[in-house]
Image: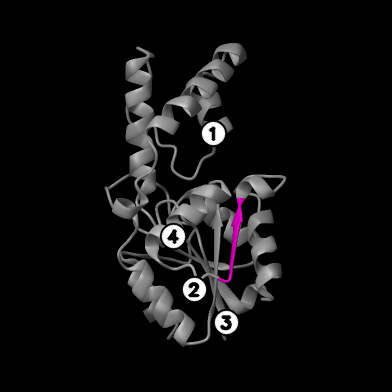
Amino acid sequence: MVKGIVFDMDGVLADTEHFYQKRREAFLMEKQFRFEAGLNFIGSNDEAIWEALVPDNPILRQDMLMEYREYRAHYPVRYKELVNPQVMPLFTILKKQGLKIGIASSSDLGSIDAMIDAAGINGLVDYRISGMECSAHKPDPEIYRKALHALGLAPDQAFAVEDSPSGIAAALNAGLKVYALKPQHGELIDQSAATAVIGQLKEVLTLLLK
């Protein structure tokens, strides 16, 4: 019996992955930095992204990363605009049904809390964890194992909702079933390892009946 659900944030609870991609591309173009158009970094982290963009020059890579962190401070995520409108009604129903709700995101805690505030779900989330609190990034299962432990759930008592291949792998490696939310902007990402793919977040309610 399912007693809880652990959600990824970026690309699942908020349409931030597309925003991140466009913001990063704007920065690179401003710096006149040549890059391969259409590179897909959904579910990745800063270090991995910049290693892929600047693979052969670690000094330049670090400089670019530091400059980008300053740049993005001037262009913060507009969570009010990007939160999936299905989040609040879905979480409200889940809590009424007695389910525990967790958020396991590679983003920092400040970003997770900003999304929670924007979505108006402060009293509905039982536990949230950032990848920065873990020793390894997704696809390592640590973040999901910590979330399950904090929620007091065994892997067979919960499932995860993800979007990226690394997130899907992390949840599977933690022993969870994982349902992948189809990309909302048609991004080509491999979700074939997921238990199933869903088109809308609210379909989680249907999954509970299976």
Number of other residues with Cα within 10 Å of mark 4, as a class: few under 14, some 14 to 19, many 20 or more: some
The amino acid pointed to by label 4 is: Asp
Q: CA distance from mark 1 to mark 3?
A: 33 Å
- The stretch in magenta equals 126-130
Q: Earlier in the sequence, mark 1 or mark 3?
A: 3
Q: Nearer the viewer, mark 4 or mark 1?
A: 4
Q: CA distance from mark 3 to mark 2?
A: 15 Å
Determine whether 82 is above or below 29 in the image: below
Q: Which residue is mark 4?
A: 117
Residue 34: image quadrant is top left
Magenta stretch contains residue 84: no
The amino acid pointed to by label 3 is: Lys
Instruction: Give the residue at x 49% y 48%.
Output: 111
Q: CA distance from mark 4 to mark 1?
A: 24 Å
Q: Nearer the viewer, mark 2 or mark 1?
A: 2
Q: Earlier in the sequence, mark 2 or mark 1?
A: 1
Q: Which residue is mark 3?
A: 3
Question: Residue 201: horizontal and vertical position, in percent?
Answer: 35, 67
- Quarter of the picture containing the N terminus is bottom right
Q: Which residue is mark 2?
A: 124
The amino acid pointed to by label 1 is: Asp
Q: Secondary structure at mark 4?
A: helix
User: Mark 3 near mark 2, Cβ–Cβ under 8 Å?
Assistant: no
Instruction: Give the residue at x 39% y 44%.
Output: 17
Q: Earlier in the sequence, mark 3 or mark 2?
A: 3
Q: Secondary structure at mark 3?
A: loop
Q: Which residue is mark 1?
A: 46
Q: Earlier in the sequence, mark 4 or mark 1?
A: 1
